[in-house]
Structure formats: C-alpha cells, structure tokens
Amino acid sequence: MLQQLRDAGVEGRDGAADPRQAVTDASRALAAAGQSDMIWGHVSVRDPAGRGAWVKASPWGLEEVTPERVLLVGADGAVLEGEGPRHIEYPIHTCIYESRPDVGCVVHTHAKYATAFASLDVPLRPISHEGALFAPPDIARFHLTGDLIDTVELGVALAESLGDRNAVLVSGHGIVTVGADPAAAVMAAVLLDRACWMQLQLEAAGGPRRWSSDEEAVAKRSSVWSGRQLAGGWQYLLRRAAPR
Ligand SMILES: [Zn+2]
C-alpha cells in the first residue's frame, strides 16, 4: 500500500506516504473534477496498519479537506485518530476494505450524471474511451436501497454488489469506485461520470447506435487506461486542485 501511494505520487511532506495527505489530495482532486456536493461524498484510503479507513470528518466539503480534517475510523465506527464527527456512511469504506484486499482507496460521491444515468436502468455502453473502463460486462449496480448506507449489513451488501469490479452505481444515491490507490479510484469516479454524461446525451437523442465491440473495449483498458495514463490524469487533477 505504501509503495502504491508512492507510485501514485501521493506522499507526505516528509517523503513518507501519509494517509491524511492522500485523503486530502484525493478529496481535492474529486472536487476539481466537479464531484463536490457541498459536504457530502467522501474518499478514504486503507490504514496501512489495518486499523480501518482514513476519511474526512463530516462537516467539510471535498475542496475543504486538509490533513487535520481527516480521521481514522475503525470497522465498528469508532474514531481512532483525528478530531471531528465521522460520516455515518463509514461502512461503505470499511466493508469494502474487508472484502477486497486489493483495494487501497474507496470513493463515494453523488456524481450527478452517473446518478441520473442509474435511474434509466439501461446497460452502460463503451461509447467513448471513458465507458471502456467499466463495460463490458455492464456496470455493477446496487438496488437494495437508495437511502444512506449507514449499517454494516448495508455495507456488506454494497461490497457484494461491487464484487471484483472497479465501480458500482448506487441507485437513487450516487457511485462507489475503488482502486489500488487514489489515482485509480479517483480517476474511475471521474471517468464514470463522464461516461454516463455522454450516454445520457445520446439516450435523449434517440439512443446510441455504435459503440466499441467487447474486444475493443477490453483492449482500451490497456492502451487508453494503462496505469501510466491514469496516473497522468490524476496528476493533472492534483495540479488543478492546487492552491494558486
Ligand atoms: Zn452518499
């Protein structure tokens, strides 16, 4: 995990990977990409020592996150480090870390185009580069509730809907994306919303007629969305998020 964070360019000021700084960078990158919803939506990184999830305190918007506003939340919801109230939807993060050892970063936002697209209940097509990161097969969906995911039971059910995928549409609510590091998880959130935006335009215009074959879409995950490409997009978002 530490090495993954270093590879993604997420390092504390002393050069060591710092979960608080990683959450700050990821939060601000999401805000720079337009995924802030006032104080709602959150991104976490896995605690390197296995104690839970590092996630912002609830009163702050994504663009307002600083390392001092990031908490360590345990699997039972206890705040183990940091100051301030935690988000009640912490099980989104802790339950996914429990079920997915490969995941080092979890994003939950109310990305507006993806949320609107989820209501159509039509397959997500790889119409553009963005969609190819998620389909085929069709993107995962969580239909159990559109209400808050505020219990361990709901967190476990969400993790089951996600399965081994990189994203899940949460009907009536938003999205959850995951990755080995913030670069992968944040870029997945940004690209998913763009893919949904594009298909929404086409559905309103009579529906898409052409999209990548399954073979081409899968190939694009190595060509268009290689780790290097995702890291490049992530670094761009960090530059946009940086104070001027
Ligand atoms: Zn939410």
Image: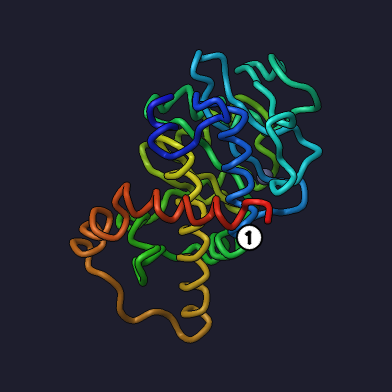
Instruction: Point out residue 55 in the picture as x, y percentages from the top left corner.
Output: 64, 31
Question: Quick one: quadrant of the N terminus?
Answer: top left
Q: Is residue 114 left or right of residue 173?
A: left
Q: Quadrant of residue 208?
A: bottom left
Relative to the observer, which residue lies in front, 186 or 235?
A: 235
Helix, strand or loop status at disc 1: loop
Which amino acid type corresponds to the residue marked 1 in the rendered image? Gly
Q: Where does the image place residue 66, in percent across and percent down from the top left?
A: 71, 36
- Asked if residue 60 is positioned above or below residue 202 in the image, the reply reads above
Point 66% across, 27% down: residue: 151
Q: Which residue is more in the foreground, 183 or 218?
A: 183
Q: Position of residue 76 (x, y in %)?
A: 65, 16
Relative to 66, is 241 above or below? below
Q: How many marks?
A: 1
Q: Label 1: which residue? A: 34
Q: Quadrant of residue 13?
A: top right
**Is the residue 43 above or below the residue 86 in the image?**
below
Cβ of mark 1 under 8 Å from ligand 1: the answer is no
Going 52% across and 33% down the picture, which residue do you hit?
A: 157
Q: Which corner quadrant of the figure contains ligand 1?
A: top right
Q: Residue at x 55, y 50 (%)?
A: 238
Q: Give residue 125's position: percent from left, percent from top.
A: 37, 67
